[in-house]
Amino acid sequence: MAAAVVGEAYPMRPDSVSLRIVASHILFVLLPVYLAATSPPTAILFLLYLWFGITMQGLLNLMHECAHYHVFQRRRGSDVLGQWILGPLMVADFDKYRRLHWAHHRNLGSDADPKYTYRVEILGWRLPFVLVTCLVGVEAFRKFIYQRGGDREVAASPSSRQWIVRTCLVHTVFGASLVAVAYGAGAGDIRAATLQGAVAYGFVYAYGMMSLTIFVATLRAIAEHQDSPDAPLAVGEAVLRNLKCGPWGRLILGCYGFAEHATHHWEPAIPYYHLERATENLADRDRQFAPRDTYVSVLTAQVTWARTGARSSTPRRGPRGDADGR
């Protein structure tokens, strides 16, 4: 599909709408961190950790949309959001992430595909093992190191040190705002406010992201690309799925068009808010694009079904379009 046709059939929406949605989503995800700063640690802190850690995965999806220039009409808007807010919040080099993600689109399912997450096995006992590696921070460390390379072509193009400066600035402001909220909520003195802010930042935010967010993101990637008995469209070692998604599944895993993942890989130039309609159009011509399973049903199959290498369907074609939407 040519870019001109995509632009005519699936136009970008007004930036004011995107800004409202993005701002509301970011505030919703960060709210439990600020709530944790308003009082000394109690048992509620664990619930706030769950809230943030699980929903933060949705902001990873939003960063993906920035990488494709799909959030705002001008590309600069997606760059600013990715480089100055989402990337720093994830402690990620956004520009490097973009190059790695485009390499994933170009090399989907091949040995050159830099995305390794969907190859993680969760069959039987391996699922709790993956959870433990996330809870103790092993997977977070692996991902941080991996963003420095992960693909020979990407690693050969060194990233700017500006991302480190941006990350330090954002986290300084973020940490200071938590202390200010704690002090304003009646912490008593600056020492108590600093302690409450540090607990909110360290446990709810930092540990929530390095443990739960990475675990949920791993499950999402597995559901989208790992083989299973449903034998959907295949591209090399990867598969492509469109998934049924209710409100909670959409909020946690499938937001920003991730539930329509096969359609996104087929037509990466289409903004996420048009992917449901694009999926219907593709499914009219090829029923393999019709959503049949949910994230839960696919992941259940991954836990209970041992892959044998056999398929009930074979690959027929590969995705088309450029990852940057051009």
Image (cartoon, rainbow, N blue to C red):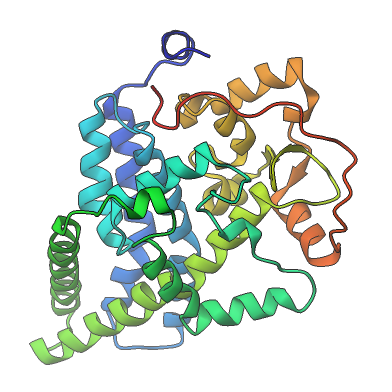
Q: Residue at x 65, y 59 (%)?
A: 119
Q: Residue at x 44, y 58 (%)?
A: 150
Q: Position of residue 192 (x, y in %)?
A: 17, 90
Q: Position of residue 109 (x, y in %)?
A: 63, 45
Which quarter of the image is occupied by the C terminus?
A: top left
Residue 63 visible at all: no
255 is higher (above) or lower (below) than 285:
below
Q: Total marks drawn?
A: 0
308 is higher (above) or lower (below) than 255:
below
Q: Quadrant of residue 245?
A: top right
- Camera-nearest residue between 142 and 165: 142
- Camera-nearest residue between 62 and 313: 313
Q: Position of residue 275 (x, y in %)?
A: 55, 27
Q: Residue at x 59, y 82 (%)?
A: 132
Q: Position of residue 165 (x, y in %)?
A: 13, 62
- Relative placement, left or right, of 95 versus 278 is left
Q: Residue at x 78, y 69 (%)?
A: 123
- Relative placement, left or right, of 122 versus 274 is right
- Relative placement, left or right, of 145 versus 214 is left
Residue 241 visible at all: yes
User: Which residue sits furthest left?
Assistant: 190
